[in-house]
Image (spheres, helix red, strand yellow):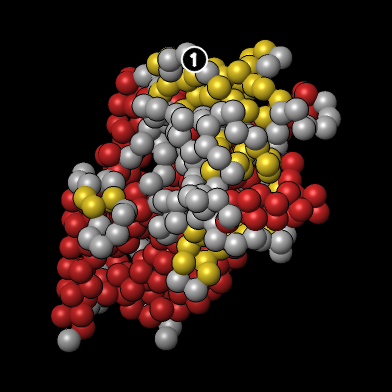
Amino acid sequence: MKKKRAIRNYVLVSIFIVLSLLLTFISFPVPGTNYNYLGIGNLHMGLELNGGIKNTYNLEVADWYEGNKMDAYNKTVERIQYLLDLNYSDAKVYLCSDNKITIEVPDTSINKNYLVGLIEMKSESGKDAEAKVTGQDIASVKYMLSGTTHGVYIEFTEKGKEKFAKLTKEVASSDKQTMYIYMDKDYENAFSEPKVTEENSYGYTFISGSGITNKKTGEEYARKLESSLIGVNMSTELDPIEVKGTFGNATKIAIYVTTVVIVIACVIIGVILFRELGLVSMLSYIFALMVSVIISALCDMQVTFAGWIGFMLGFVFNYFLHMFYLNRVKKEYAMGKKFIVSFTSAYKPALFNILDVLLITTGTVLLTMIVPSNAIRIMALNFVITIPATAFTSLFLNKVLAVDYTAFNLRNEKKVNFVRGDEIDEVE
């Protein structure tokens, strides 16, 4: 019965590893969702590894903006970097002159949602129509789900409340009953055209429709409106320029080869140290490796050099935790415990030690994410992604597979490189 259970566990773990390897190399749309699963081989590469594009934009401060222009430009840089960080690991934005800004992304185009613009609400369409409400009249913007309707909640300032009331009254009494919301001074294409049937004097409004079909599109709409509150508009007549990767293809190949070499080296060292038991433990270790790979693919993590280092540090950390438990079993046997008993008697003290190390390490890594360095933050984030699989395998799966091994080896310590201590007799 014990052998059957052991064989079942080994087969299940092995099947998972094989299936994970297959998922590593394929991509597919998930039925019923807008999500596309990307295998690790199809993950997006960062700027330093695969390059991308860049473009330079002119900055124009709104007439209603009160304050220093450089403050407005710096706020623009901070805002765009925040938006880029939501989708990229190493996209860049920086001022390249007094009134110009450059954006670099590891992509084939720069999405307009990352740009900062000026919002204008009008009762008529076109450039010449008067803007009745602008960014200075808006206090806050946020995505909201009202019942089953996705939309954006906009709260106005005191002056904005009066202006919006006049605007909605005018629009409601017009033939089209359409308000025109423009962004980025693109007067040929309205950002949104909500219908207005009555005056709104509440000081807030809820906009739905306008392409808002789910939470994602609602949040994108809200973020775009939030960007318009800074009081800066961006425009360019330049075509994007290709950016070459800092490291190139040779580095990418070196990363793949180094990863494989490290994993193989860990397996070999484990087998040398503990022979058959080390091989069994490596099943658990590779299981954790594949789980972490799948998590990174599900999160659509962008591959950067710093991120790869974080991943590898996480894998090596897990390896040492696996070896720690096996070494603890070896010590229990050396001190006189029976072969089979040593596996269970070693678990409790090893469990608390491993848990302590996991908690301290995870907490320390999370703290490093506040360091104002994008490379360190990415490294820490990728390390944290490996923690769930590390915790599951080092605290549970490694022990289960090791104990299962005793179904095939009841007392032959030579097969696992165990040695009884000098002048120590076997105890219960």
How many C-alpha atoms fall within 10 Å of the one at disc 1: few (<14), some, or many (≥20)?
few
Which of the image's four quarters has the C terminus? bottom left
Which of the image's four quarters has the N terminus? bottom left
Seen at 49% across and 45% down, the residue is 192
Report whether residue 371 is seen: no
Left or right, residue 341 beside residue 230: left
Percent x, y of residue 188 = 46, 30
Between 423 and 120, which is closer to the camera in this rendering? Answer: 120
Report whether residue 75 is seen: yes
Between 81 and 21, which is closer to the camera in this rendering? Answer: 81
Q: Callout 1: helix, strand or loop?
A: loop
Percent x, y of residue 290 = 31, 54
Left or right, residue 397 beside residue 202: left
Extreme residue toward the right, this view: 67
Between 348 and 172, which is closer to the camera in this rendering? Answer: 172
Seen at 36% across and 69% down, the residue is 397
Seen at 42% across and 39% down, the residue is 302
Examine the rendered structure and indicate whether residue 366 appears above or below residue 350. above
The three-letter code of the residue at mark 1 reads Glu
Examine the rendered structure and indicate whether residue 18 appears above or below residue 180. below
The residue that mark 1 highlights is 237
Seen at 70% across and 55% down, the residue is 165
* Residue 4 position by quadrant: bottom left
Percent x, y of residue 32 = 25, 62
Between 277 and 287, which is closer to the camera in this rendering? Answer: 287
Count of picture labels: 1
* Residue 388 position by quadrant: bottom left
Percent x, y of residue 115 = 55, 32
